[in-house]
Amino acid sequence: MNVIWNGIKKIECIIFVIIVLVDLLTKLMANIFLPFREMVCFIGEKVCFFLIYNQDPTGGQANAMLQNYSNKNLLILSSCFSALVLLAYILFIRKQKMRTLYKILIGIGVFVIVNILTEFILPIFEGVNISSWTTSVFGKLTALTIIFCIIFYFNLNKWVRLSLVIIFAAGIGNLLSHFYYPYQVVDFIYVKGSYELLRIGVFNGADLAFDVGFLGLIISLLISGMKKVF
């Protein structure tokens, strides 16, 4: 725990709390005051409020990729499990006194074994009905666990770290949506052209924070990489 608490920066805590609270409050207000599925525009037709509820565990592009699978939710849960197994391996092996090449080769072996086992196990549970709520919550928890471990257990550039904190806060915001009425993610902001630019249609504050964090992460990684090269 000391590793975690020693790694937390005050500014990161403030940004995290602000994002989560603003996202929570705006979603609650939207759910109370906005009409459901009715466009309320306030900057011409460019920026509008449009309240909808979203419990889909994946985004639009991922849905298109998974549309041929009969039990999409089961596939998502199995992928999350595989990701957690690999994360556990990485956290375990990173401090072991072993050549990096061996660590990578063993990691590849773990990945292959997990995928082979998944291929055998998935057909057994093919008929199991898994709710979108369960899949969405477990998927978000898996992603948040991975980001949490990256933030607190790896040495990161401060800007990379801050970008991940913003992404983490955004994930927490959307995760919390599953635990208060209507127990789905509340989306209510529509900006004309946002789907073409950011690949999001109607969104919320957490989605916006995620895009900011993701953009910051890319820029931070590029700058960090350029510094090492030059």
Image (cartoon, rainbow, N blue to C red):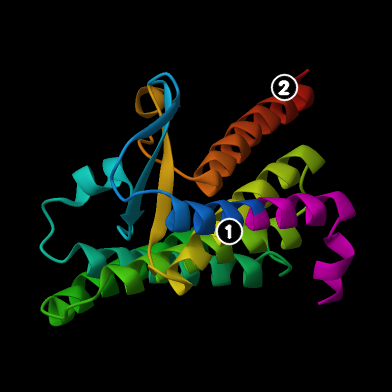
Main SS of residues in magenta: helix
197 left or right, relative to 92? left
Q: Position of residue 134 (x, y in %)?
A: 34, 74
Q: Which residue is mark 2?
A: 226
Disc 1 residue type? Answer: Leu
Specify start and end residues of the magenta stretch as a single range. 1-21
Left or right of 123, for residue 95: right
Q: Which mark is residue 71?
A: none
* Residue displayed at 30% across by 57% down: 56
Residue 168 location, quadrant: bottom right
Question: Residue 155: within the magenta?
Answer: no
* Three-letter amino acid code of the residue under disc 2: Met
Decide: few, some or many residues near mark 2? Use Cα within 10 Å; few <14, some 14-19, many ≥20.
few
Numbered badge on residue 24: 1
Q: Please report contact status of discs 1 and 2: CB closer than 8 Å, yes or no.
A: no
Q: Is residue 29 left or right of residue 113?
A: right
Q: Report x, y in % for residue 18.
A: 72, 52
Q: Tell which circle, 1 or 2, labels the residue nearer the N-terminal end.
A: 1
Which percent across, then down, holds residue 179? 47, 73
Give above or below for 178 relative to 206. below
Please name whichever residue, 129 or 1, is drawn nearer the observer in this view of the structure.
Answer: 129
- Secondary structure under the numbered disc 2 in the rendered image: helix
Q: Quadrant of the N terminus?
A: bottom right
- Is residue 15 on the magenta stretch? yes
Q: Quadrant of residue 169?
A: bottom right
Residue drawn where x is 55% and y is 66% of the image: 87
Residue at mark 1 to residue at mark 2: CA–CA distance: 38 Å
Q: Secondary structure at mark 1?
A: helix
Q: Residue at x 88, y 55 (%)?
A: 10
| Above or below, 28 relative to 193 | below
Closer to the camera, 221 or 86? 221
Q: Is residue 168 visible?
A: no
